[in-house]
Amino acid sequence: MQPHRDTPFRLPRRAALRGLAGAAMAGGIASLPRPLRAGPAAAPRSIRLGGPIFEKTSDPEALALAHRKLGYRAAYCPSLKLEDTDRIRAVEAAFAKHDVAIAEVGVWCNLLEADPGRRAANLKRVTEGLALADAVGARCCVDIAGSYSTTSWFGPHPDNLSPKFFDAAVENARAIIDAVKPKRAKFAFEMMGWAMPDSPACGLRLLKAVDREAFGIHLDPCNLVNCPERFYRNADLLNECFDTLGPWIVSCHAKDLTWDVEMNIHFREVEPGKGSMDYATYLRRLAALPQEPPLMLEHLGKAEEYDRARSYIQEVGTRAGLSFG
């Protein structure tokens, strides 16, 4: 496999990106998984927004209603054990009854852990996560592809941008999918700024290389902002993501970035609306996807912070003619 990085970074024109995606769909890039499903003639204009809730209950019905009370139509998967089939069925039924999509089962661990025993245990955890996602009807199970860092499970390392990392990510994705053979859920790697997939083009290459219909795309555009050009031109980055990967996107994260000015580059996550992410573009492009990928708020600490973030996204979307109900 060849290194994937473009040096220097230049955002392609949207026409070129449409050509790239079109070539992929037409067979110019072979063996891509099929898109999730064909959409209606008129794309839906709604957003499945979701996020953590702070309701103290384990009752499936109450959990689903707590999401709807906040205006959410998507949710992170509640705490479940794979062997508890009765509770899994109850959660699936309650959330479906109230039209709350279970966006993702997040299994956050290092699939490239240096210690062989821990690496095998992590692979088992993620495999069980995909099985759970399929059992409960979640859109996906998601993890990062991993890291060769020995000091942080998600940290930077020069080999995270190497052909051997790409090959290992492909091998792990295939092993997880082939072990579960999911009928509904997809498996996806979250985008990262210092590990693959770190660009839309890399995500497309992974789709081709994994070559499994159950492999999808998890979109987190803030995680892709790793240089000034992507920060300032994040609308172009968003369009690149949707032009290249739109049919395969299964779930998305919502946050924002600001630039803390110092003698080197320091981007910091903040609440949506307190940074520079072009949410009007993000929401418009997301709403046009027929598969309605959920948009999940994350990385905030308090209920009131999520309230402000939710209100901001809903306000931007409403101005753009979108709905959340």
Image (cartoon, grey):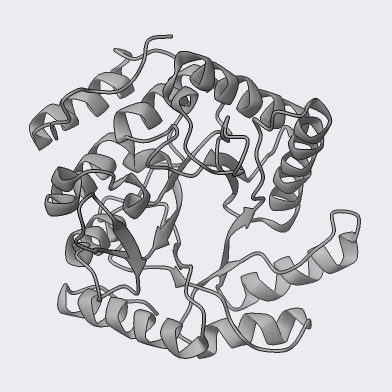
Q: In front: 259, or 309?
A: 259
* Residue 238 in sight from this viewpoint: yes
What x and y, as percent, mark residue 173?
62, 28
Would residue 208 be found to the left or right of residue 10 on screen? Answer: right
x%, y% of residue 143?
A: 59, 45
Q: Is residue 227 above or below residue 96?
A: above
In the image, 96 versus 283, the foreground residue is 283
- Residue located at (61% from left, 41% from top): 151
> Which residue is pictured at 52% across the width and 15% down the height?
164
Which quadrant of the figure contains the C terminus?
Answer: bottom left
Name the image quarter holding residue 78: bottom right
Determine whether 292 is above or below 191 in the image.
below
Residue 63 lies left or right of residue 304; in this view the side is right
Q: Is residue 32 visible?
A: no
Asked if residue 30 is positioned above or below residue 188 in the image, the reply reads above
Q: Residue furthest front?
A: 263
Rendering coords of residue 50 (x, y %) = 48, 72
Query: Is 324 displayed left or right of 58 in the figure?
Result: left
Q: Residue at image x 33%, y 42%?
A: 246
Q: How many marks?
A: 0
Looking at the rendered image, the quarter that the N terminus falls into is top left
Q: Position of residue 252 (x, y in %)?
A: 42, 56
Q: Nearer the viewer, residue 156 or 262?
A: 262
Query: Residue 304 is drawn in which quadrant?
Result: bottom left
Location of residue 4 (image quadrant): top left
Residue occupying the point 75% across, 32% down: 119
